[in-house]
Image (cartoon, grey):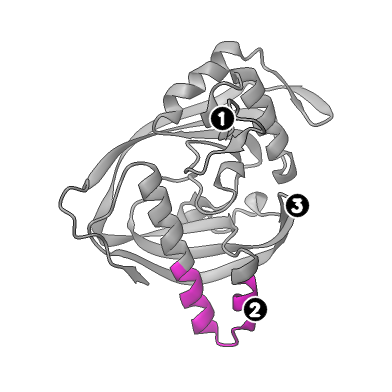
Amino acid sequence: MTFEGSNETSERKFVELHVACFIFDQPLTQQEIPYFRSAVSKTAGSQFDKFHNHNLSEEGGKYIYRYPLIQYKRIKGKASIVCIGDGTEDIGHFFQHNRHNLAIGNRKAEFRTESIRADKFRLQIWEKSFPLNIINWLALNQKNYTLYREMTDESEKIFFLEKILTGNILSFCKGVGLFVQRDVKVQIDEVWASGVTQFKEQTLMWFNVQFRTNICIPYYLGLGKGAGFGFGTILPPAQKNEKAERVP
């Protein structure tokens, strides 16, 4: 699947993307991630909207439609936070006020940082393709799910998913300030698992996919729907069999 980029010369050819990954010493289930997000956001202060992506100055706390720069994950089964771009600065508000005790639903536990990794990536379109996995990817909304189920040809389904994944990658690039000038290429090599899960009171289909693209996406970033809640997580190709990361 190839997407033709813009011909506007004013657009940026690359961005220097800062990414920080914090892994805590507490286990976390996929179902507990919303509670983890709420606890971290409350600790940091609700006025910092990158933690929750809601404009609390408006009545009802209107949702801010943007790529999440602070994402909540379970990495190797443990509670984790991945921060991107400006999110790497805002995460300091959490650690400034964190007293380690967080309420995750009905349970309270001490969350201590087990490991920290900070990197800087050059995000751009490359001549070569990079093999990646994306797990717990919520590719289909209700409309697309109906279209997908009506398809009988497997190659047609793959092409359909490639188109959606390309769109998710473009949305990510735009969200971090990269507006592509060249073709974005996506090739799905294998859909190695799929199923259904509940997300925001909707039943959605998830996919674990091995694919290649000519954008080197940093590991553990999320793509697509629910990216801030641990869905659509990018993993190295060697972690294809990371069963602990799958949606139950």
Q: Is residue 169 above or below residue 156?
A: above
Q: CA distance from mark 2 to mark 3?
A: 21 Å
Q: Disc 1 designates what residue?
A: 51
Taking the spot 50% from the left edge, 82% from the top edge, the residue there is 156
The dominant secondary structure in magenta is helix
Q: Is 28 left, or right, of 187 in this rendering?
A: right
Can residue 75 be seen here? The reply is no
**Mark earlier in primary sequence (2, 3):** 2
- The region drawn magenta spans 145-163
Residue occupying image coordinates x 27% and y 50%: 124
Which amino acid type corresponds to the residue marked 2 in the rendered image? Answer: Arg
Report which residue position mark 3 lands on: 201
State the residue position of label 2. Answer: 149
Whole-angstrom CA distance, mark 1 to mark 3, is 21 Å
Name the spot of residue 221 as percent of width and height, x first.
48, 45
How many residues crowd around disc 3 within 10 Å: few (fewer than 14), some, or many (20 or more)? few
The answer to whether residue 97 is above or below residue 33 is above
Residue furthest to the bottom in view is: 152
Question: What distance separates the C-alpha of mark 1 from that of mark 2?
Answer: 35 Å
Answer whether residue 99 is magenta in the image: no
